[in-house]
Amino acid sequence: MEAEWRKAMFRFILNNIGQLDQDEFDSWVDDDFDLAPLLAPFLKTMSVHRDRILAEMHQMFPAEVFDRFKVEHPEIAIDSADKVIFKIGKELEAIKSIVSSL
C-alpha cells in the first residue's frame, strides 16, 4: 500500500507539471506563477489522508521528480536543470505546507 501512495503522489506532481506547454513551463520555471496554490482545492479534499501524503512527500526529492519529468516529457526544452530542480523543490515544499495545514 505504501508503494501505491508513493506512485500516486509522484503521478499527481508529474501530471500537473506535465500539463504545461512550453511557454507555461518556462513561465513557471521563471517564477511567474506557482502550481501549489492551484492544487490546494484538490489537496483539501484529501485531508483524511494528510499523514500518509506528508510521509510520502517527505521522501520525494526534486531531482528525482525532475528525472522522471524529463523522461516523460522530452518535448519540453529545459534551459537550466538546476533552475527546474529548484522550482520543483519550492513546489514540493509549498504542497507540504498546504497539506500540513489540513
Image: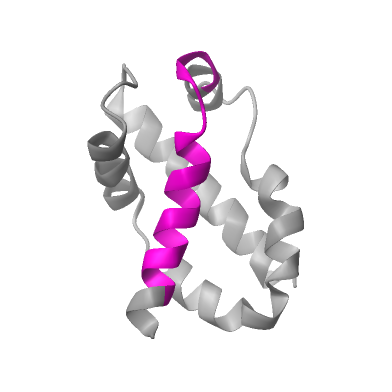
User: Where residue 22 sits: x, y (%)?
Assistant: 45, 17
Going 57% across and 26% down the picture, which residue do you hit? 31
Q: Is residue 78 shown in magenta?
A: no
User: Where residue 50 sits: x, y (%)?
Assistant: 63, 78
Depth check: give the residue in front, 31 or 43.
43
User: Where residue 48 sits: x, y (%)?
Assistant: 69, 82
> Relative to 42, is 78 above or below?
above
> Relative to 22, is 63 above or below?
below
User: Where residue 27 sits: x, y (%)?
Assistant: 55, 19
Going 54% across and 73% down the picture, which residue do you hit? 53
Identify the main secondary structure in magenta. helix
Left or right for 31, reference 43: left
- Quadrant assignment for the C terminus: bottom right
> Relative to 58, is 42 above or below?
above
Going 51% across and 33% down the picture, which residue do you hit? 19
Note whether residue 33 is visible. Answer: yes
Q: Which residues are magenta?
A: 5-24
- Quadrant assignment for the N terminus: bottom left
Note whether residue 59 is visible. Answer: no
Quarter of image, res 101: bottom right
Depth check: give the residue in front, 94 or 19.
19
Q: Is residue 23 shown in magenta?
A: yes
Look at the image and name its color scheme. Answer: one colour
Badge count? 0
Going 38% across and 75% down the picture, which residue do you hit? 4
